[in-house]
Amino acid sequence: MTEITNFRGETSHQSGEAGVDASVAVLIRRVGERVRRARERRGIPRRVLSDMSGVSPRYLAQLEAGEGNISIGLLQRVAVALDHRIEWLVGEDDPWNSDAMRVADLFRTASGDMQQSVLRVLSPEPAEILRARRICLIGLRGAGKSTLGALAGKALDIPFVELNTEIEEQSGMPVDEVIALYGQEGYRKLEAQAVTRVIATHDTMILAVAGGIVGEPETYNTLLGHFHTIWLKAAPDEHMARVRAQGDERPMAGNPEAMEQLRSILTSREALYGKALAQLDTTGLTVEEALAQFLALIEDRKFLS
């Protein structure tokens, strides 16, 4: 008689179900192996994947070793953090031997110009029409999205919108409460709905989004297709200093490895942020200098033309 744990965490002792239990064990090992390979391909430490997905490092270690039973909900969080579809982790066919995965890898590592050429071929409408006069600012907190977005909106006399404000208006509660009540998955659904609503109601605008939105493939692709995206970037120490200057000590509170984790998150998201049409490094710039460069970038790239 074989004792095997199923996907609900229950232990089965029924010898008549040996074939089913064996297939479940194979599935668990396959999922663990694919999660490990996906994490290593993206160069993400397990601790950082834990922070991004909300799944504990110990649980991730068990999962990758083929010894852990993960719920569908938690596996979806891991898939999102790895920029993968959940079916890539559980399907019988090896996704890394598929044409779709090879194309995705080539696209991810291609230059921005090449990526836009591919999108122009695949898109049924010209990108210029889809993006209209909408600008979206992406990047980690502390890069200047809110500050520059608001100042540029005022200077250009166009609306500036923070996506989290839209989510709060939609849900009727602060974002922290949304996450506490509905979890990360619930927040991401509201986030996707807010993006769709903003696109439907604004042809001209500047939008600032949360740094983690790039980890949700469908929502991020919607942004890339319907906005002129600009990655606002800064050195890790400036990101942290600006957040603390705003009076938020949470990133460092009780976490001596916060700076190392920030660097790891920046590294893991670099390829995703790099999909933006343009980049602006605000490291070492005053607000006035950064705003001048931001407005010049919009003019040079004709994002509002």
Image: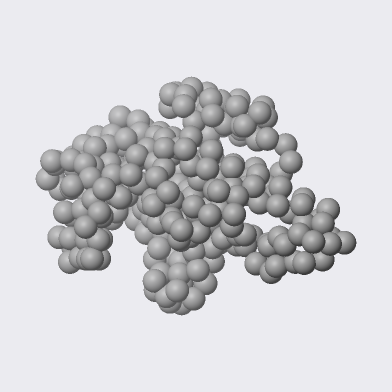
Residue 137 locus on image (x, y percent):
36, 47
Residue in the foreground of this view, choosing between 255 and 167: 255
Instruction: Find residue 258 and report its image quarter.
Output: bottom left
Q: Which quadrant holds residue 20?
A: bottom right
Residue 203, percent from left and from top: 47, 49
Q: Which residue is at 43% across, 24% downward?
A: 111
Q: Which residue is at the front of the view, 305 or 181?
A: 181
Residue visible at 82% across and 66% down in the picture: 14
Q: Residue at x 50, y 68 (%)?
A: 183
Q: Give x and y (percent) for residue 36.
A: 52, 43
Number of on-image labels: 0
Which colour assignment does the render follow?
Answer: one colour
Q: Is residue 58 visible?
A: yes
Q: In which quarter of the image is the C terminus?
A: top left
Residue at 53% across / 25% down in the picture?
106
Taking the image as shown, residue 65 lies to the left or right of residue 264, namely: right
Left or right for 121, reference 305: right
Of all residues shown, which one is farthest toward the right? 16
Residue 201 visible in the current orientation: no
Quadrant including the N terminus: bottom right
Q: From the viewer's perspective, tell me whether residue 108 is left or right of residue 76.
A: left
191, 20: nearer the viewer: 20
Farthest residue in the front direction? 1
Q: In this view, does 266 lie above or below 257?
A: above
Residue 164: x, y in percent?
A: 40, 63
